Amino acid sequence: MKKILIIGCPGSGKSSLAVWLSKELSLPLVHLDKINWLNNQEYLSRDKFNNQLTNELMKKEWLIDGNYNRTLEKRITHADTVIWLDLPKQVCLFRIIKRYITNHHKVNSHGNPDTISWSFIKFVWQFNKKTSPQIKNLETMYKKHTNFITLHSTKEVSYFKKNLTPFS
């Protein structure tokens, strides 16, 4: 586990798991939102984002958290492990609303703006339906070279953390 990709719906706990796992395994952490967002309203051009992502992927070790589906296959081809947080949409939505209420008017440390809109809620609500087939297809394509770990609940995430054996 030297090149780990953490993916999942917004609110699934990608960043929280990434921060914990980065410390646990002493891996440099890359939040895709931190690369993408310059501030709460501006983000990098697609080309600049792609260049920065490529630079990160070429490094010897990393832990990358984030979705950005257009680059998912590229990231999977470089990863040795993919952790997919496939939590229920209700859990994700609850966490997003809680995070918004708790952190409203604070600067988000991961770069992306903390906003809630109907389009974002719709995106979260439909995330698994729209994205799961793509992830499952990529898992089928790359499972010979990449270890896929799918966690479906907070209980499974806790179990994963409790039973992590980094040197196996």
Image (cartoon, rainbow, N blue to C red):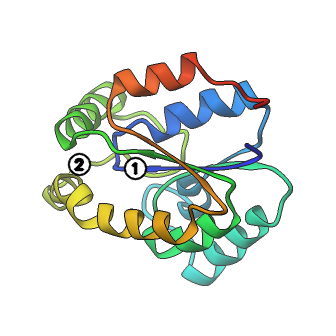
Q: Is residue 151 left or right of residue 165?
A: left
Q: Quadrant of residue 168?
A: top right
SS at circle 2: loop
> What residue is drawn where x is 34% and y is 45%?
86
Picture coordinates of residue 2 (x, y %)?
77, 46
Amino acid type, callout 2: Ile
Is residue 155 visible in the rendered image? The answer is: yes
> What residue is drawn where x is 81% and y is 50%?
61
Q: Is residue 45 left or right of residue 93?
A: right
In the rendered image, which residue does mark 1 sit on? 8
Q: Nearer the viewer, mark 2 or mark 1?
A: 1
Amino acid type, callout 1: Gly
Say which of 36 and 61 sits in front: 61
Picture layout, residue 52 above or below residue 155:
below
Q: CA distance from mark 2 to mark 1?
A: 18 Å
Is residue 42 visible in the rendered image? The answer is: no
Residue 116 numbered mark, or none: 2
SS at circle 1: strand
Picture coordinates of residue 120 (x, y %)?
23, 57
Name the quadrant of the N terminus.
top right
Q: Is residue 1 left or right of residue 146?
A: right
Circle 1 residues within 10 Å: few <14, some 14–19, many ≥20: many
Picture coordinates of residue 75 (x, y %)?
61, 66
Picture layout, residue 124 above or below residue 68:
above
Who comes first in sequence, dot 2 or dot 1? 1
> What residue is drawn where x is 21% and y is 40%?
93
Q: Residue furthest bottom?
A: 47
Q: Residue furthest top?
A: 162
